[in-house]
Image: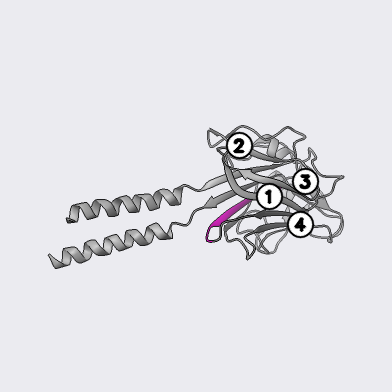
Amino acid sequence: MNSKRLLAIVVCIVLAAGAQVGSARTAYIDFGDSQGAATGLVDGSPAEWNVVTDWTAHTFGTLADSDGADTDIELAVTTGFNTTYGDTLTGGQWNDPAIPWSVGAATHENFSVGSSTSSTGEITLSDLEPGLTYTISLISSRDSSGSRDGIYKVNGEFADVGGASGSNPFNAYTDGYQTHDVMEWWNVAPDASNEIRLFVTPNASGHYNYINAMKVEIVPEPATLSLLALGGLGALWRRRRTR
């Protein structure tokens, strides 16, 4: 095989690796539907939403991605949220151009948990692919002041960015409704059970937490293609040295 042909093959492999990196799939989740199911454009394109209407403990089922295709990811409300306060129109309907997926119906309604530090809402994503990583983004918004602060963790970790830093609580009014901060967890690996768990806990007795919408980005692992590309470049380099 001549050098030009080998170089062309290597370039194709590198481009394929780049396409793999850029082909992350996204699932959008709207908690509550009293404002109607979340619909509309995300980044200028129609997007499929998964609308979870039941705040009690149950298995929702398989998530669809933004194109409507099955992701094979199962979502469950593992520990129920407060039935009295769940699915309420208290998030404050907002759409921030800097957050294209913050469509009004998704931000307006929420599930809530609170009144006691022993009250914890839990969302579980299961049947995840080992070896893949996931980016989890969460909107928590409440349109009135008060004791709206709580602890949000994914697989035991605080968010990488968004409102609260480190172990500081996130306030759904000041951080969520007023400044439109979004909590994000980057490169989350599934646990030993191939699950990712979101835990929502009030910061103190008499405080309340909210979840309005969540985005799950499925990032494929391009390591194999990258190794092939490196191997091809190595072969090309050796061939040029022996000529």
Q: Nearer the viewer, residue 231 or 113?
A: 231
- In the figure, 203 relative to 182: above or below? below
Q: Amino acid type of disc 1?
A: Leu
Q: Indicate the secondary structure of the residue bearing disc 1.
A: strand
User: Circle 2 sits in a helix, a strand or a loop, which is it?
Assistant: loop
Q: Which residue matches tag 4?
A: 150
- Give how far apart the Cα atoms at labels 4 and 1 are: 22 Å
Q: Which residue is drawn at 34% across and 53% down?
A: 14
Image quadrant assignment for residue 200: bottom right
Marks 4/2 in contact by CB < 8 Å: the verdict is: no
Residue 74: x and y in percent read 66, 50
Residue 68 position within the rendered picture, expressed as x and y whole percent measured from the top left: 58, 37
Tag of residue 75? 1
Query: Badge 3: few (under 14), some or many (20 or more) residues near its Cα, within 10 Å?
Result: many
Q: Can the viewer see residue 179?
A: no
The image shows residue 188 at horizontal and vertical percentages of: 58, 59
In the foreground, 237 or 215:
237
Quarter occupied by the N terminus: bottom left
Task: Tell me what residue is drawn at x 66 percent, y 43 percent.
Answer: 29
What's the mark number on residue 176? none
- What type is the residue that disc 3 sits on? Phe
The extreme left residue here reads 243
Q: What element carries label 3?
A: strand
The disc, 4 or 1, on the residue closer to the chain's N-terminal end is 1
* Sequence-wise first label, 1 or 3: 1
State the residue position of label 3.
Answer: 111
Answer left or right for 233 relative to 90.
Answer: left
Measured Cα–Cα span from mark 1 to mark 3: 15 Å
Which range of residues does the magenta coloring cover?
131-140
